[in-house]
Image (cartoon, rainbow, N blue to C red):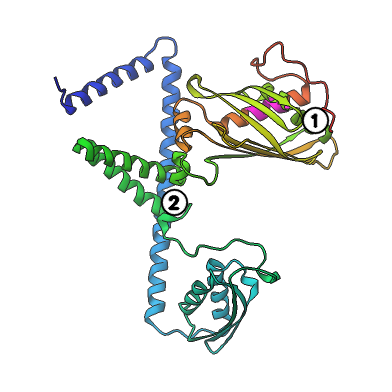
Amino acid sequence: MRVPMGVLGSLVGGVGLGAGLMYLTDPRSGRRRRAVVHDKALHAVHETEEAATVVVRDIVHRARGFVFETKGKLRREEVDDRTIEARIRSALGRVCSHTHAIHVSVEQGRVRLDGVALKAEYPRILSRIAHVRGVLDVTDNLQVFKQPGSHPELQGGTIRPGDRPEFLQHNWSPAARFVAGLGGASLLTWGLHRGGLGGLGSVFLGSLITLRSITNIELRSLTGMGGGRLAIDVHKNIIVHAPVREVFGFWRAMENFPRFMSHVEEVRTSGEDRSHWRVRGPAGTVFEWDAIVTRLIPYQVLAWKSVDGSTVRHAGIIHFAPCNDGRSTRLDIRMSYHPPVGALGHVFARLLGADPKKQMDDDLMQLKSIIETGKASREQVSPSTPKWTGPRPIH
């Protein structure tokens, strides 16, 4: 017997409501849970108000910019040559990877270009300059080369892809995220009411667009498909009151990581540059991978990353710098990882109560306590864990 979607939805909603009431009215923990829900609701309201203010401000600024740009195109303005040159320099920065290799001279609105340029960027350079307001004519004396070759001016840098539409850029503006969020929510709602295969596709597409607008992470990183940047990046700074030699030695002995990283169960080293990680994920999941040291400068830099083909792509780099007093060390810590399902894994992990950034704050305070006092600040360390006695020798 087929159950109508409306009846099924009401049944699921009733079960969810009952479970929520039981959770909040529990005699033992209900009061604390209600207080937590209240605080989270207030925090969500404040964040929503702040986000709305940012979106409105962005829309107003874009509208003003559009109006001024339209006025400038409709009327003939008298612009001095220095202003035109500044506009050209700004335009070149969008389409040219070696702006210093192009010499620009302007005389009464007529532009002369000298220097060298790459063939892949050449058409965009001319097109962009020709559309700069105030430019009357362009004299092209550029030398175009397919490859940098022996030309020092073209060495280094990366070829710019040119201007990309708003929704194809890596970071969306607040206004674009607002529009995309409305569109994704509309598709999601329509798909839920439509049902069937078409409705299912609409729900899937609307969910992706909505998550893209909320997280501001590219879809390939959000879903974990394709290459590109790692999905989750965490950057922290901390000062530890211990000499840089001692702090570096503690980090270099990667077997110490489980002592202060709450989600790391075990790190086994084999040799100086290779290690095996066992990490506990949300909902009792466990991930394992091998990692190698990619950069090692004693008492300055330590970097590592997971080997190719690992289930979780992970990387970390620590910069060590002694403070002025000579007895403290400043740590600049960057860690990145790509869960098996991309940033969606991060979203689901947060729903289950695991926030990597908050967790790292707690872990660094644990690290600080271990190095400064020789003991952990929380009773989560196994009694069999050996006490830290000093830095590991550097080979």
Which residue is rendered at x = 44% and y = 13% of the image? 29
Sequence-first tag of 2 and 1: 2
Name above or below for residue 260 compared with residue 110: above
Image quarter of residue 45: top left
Q: Could you say whether the residue bearing mark 1 is in a helix, strand or loop?
A: helix
Label annotation for residue 249: 1
Most extreme residue toward the bottom, as rendered?
108
Assign the magenta stretch its main secondary structure.
helix
Q: In which quadrant will I find the N terminus?
A: top left
Q: CA distance from mark 2 to mark 1?
A: 45 Å
Would you say residue 283 is visible in this rendering? yes
Disc 2 versus disc 1: nearer the observer: 1
- Mark 1 surroundings: few (<14), some (14-19) or many (≥20) residues within 10 A: some
The picture quadrant where one finds residue 50 is: top left
Residue 15 — which label?
none
Percent x, y for residue 202? 27, 42
**Amino acid residing under circle 1:** Gly
* Amino acid type shown at disc 2: Val
Tell me residue 352's x, y (percent). Answer: 46, 25
**Residue that badge 2 annotates:** 54
Relative image position of residue 216 (x, y in whole percent): 45, 46
Residue 17: in magenta span: no
**In this view of the protein, which residue sits in the foreground, 47 or 245?**
245
> Magenta stretch?
363-368
Q: Residue at x 80, y 30 (%)?
A: 249
Residue placed farthest to the left in the image?
1
Q: Is residue 168 above or below residue 339?
A: below
Measuring from the top left, give residue 93's x and y in whole percent. 56, 68
367 lies left or right of 110: right
Mark 2: secondary structure: helix
Of residue 266 and residue 81, the one placed in the foreground of this image is 266
The answer to whether 189 is drawn above or below residue 102 in the figure is above
